[in-house]
Image: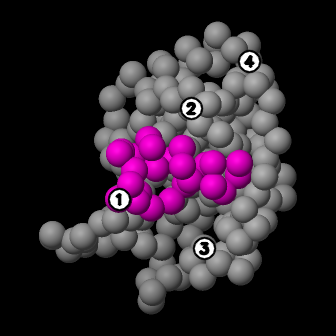
Amino acid sequence: MRAPDLRQTLMDALSKTGRASSDYDLNKDVVLPEGRKLTPASVLIAVRLDTGNVILTKRSAKLKHHPGQIAFAGGKQDASDVDAIAAALREASEEIGLMPDCVEVLGTLPAHETVTGYVVTPVIALVHGPFDPVPEAGEVSEVFEVPLTHFAAPAMFRIEGRRWQGRRRQYFVVPYGPYYIWGATARILRALADRMA
């Protein structure tokens, strides 16, 4: 996909209306408590302008939460972050060495609620120029790329399930080669695919 087409495709997706998503979308029997406190967080859906690839990470197996899972660069919004975009850019710099001056933010998708109590803002951005990732050893074991076209059609996603906290939970998956992309990452990508379809 050529650079102008890539930018236009993502801008068109961002211009469409859509509702917030959650890890509970496929589990209608779950009743969420009123007044629950969610922690603000954000992730960077970074797409390389030169290749059209989405930059993803494999979390360190040593982490307490979600060890070894596939994720976007991102995390909790700190008090020093002016907004969700600033948090996503800071986290991408810390986790994979992606400097903000290489990033063109295009916009955000509606927030995503996770089962772990976060409300995550997905920030869509283009990465300009060469980028050699520098994984933060304590958090990231690998940085890899997947063509955006792999995530562009809802038909690429499957629904799978497993038992979690005493009940069967369903979730989206969108595997790519040896990478099993599932959970919140797959659900956010599915929300983008719905807008790109």
Is any atom of residue 47 visible in this view? Answer: yes
- The residue at 31%/72% (across/down) is 30
Q: Label 3 belongs to which residue?
A: 66
Indicate whether 66 appears above or below 164. above
Chain-order first, disc 1 or disc 2: 1
Q: CA–CA distance between discs 3 and 1?
A: 24 Å
Which quarter of the picture shows residue 178? bottom right
Q: Label 4 belongs to which residue?
A: 1
Q: Label 1 belongs to which residue?
A: 79
Q: Which of marks 4 and 2 is in front?
A: 2
Which quarter of the picture shows residue 149? top right
Q: CA–CA distance between discs 2 and 3?
A: 24 Å
Q: What element carries label 3?
A: loop
Q: Label 2 belongs to which residue?
A: 125
Q: Where is residue 97 in the image (x, y as percent from the top left)?
A: 71, 48
Chain-order first, disc 4 or disc 2: 4
* In the image: residue 84, left or right of residue 56: left
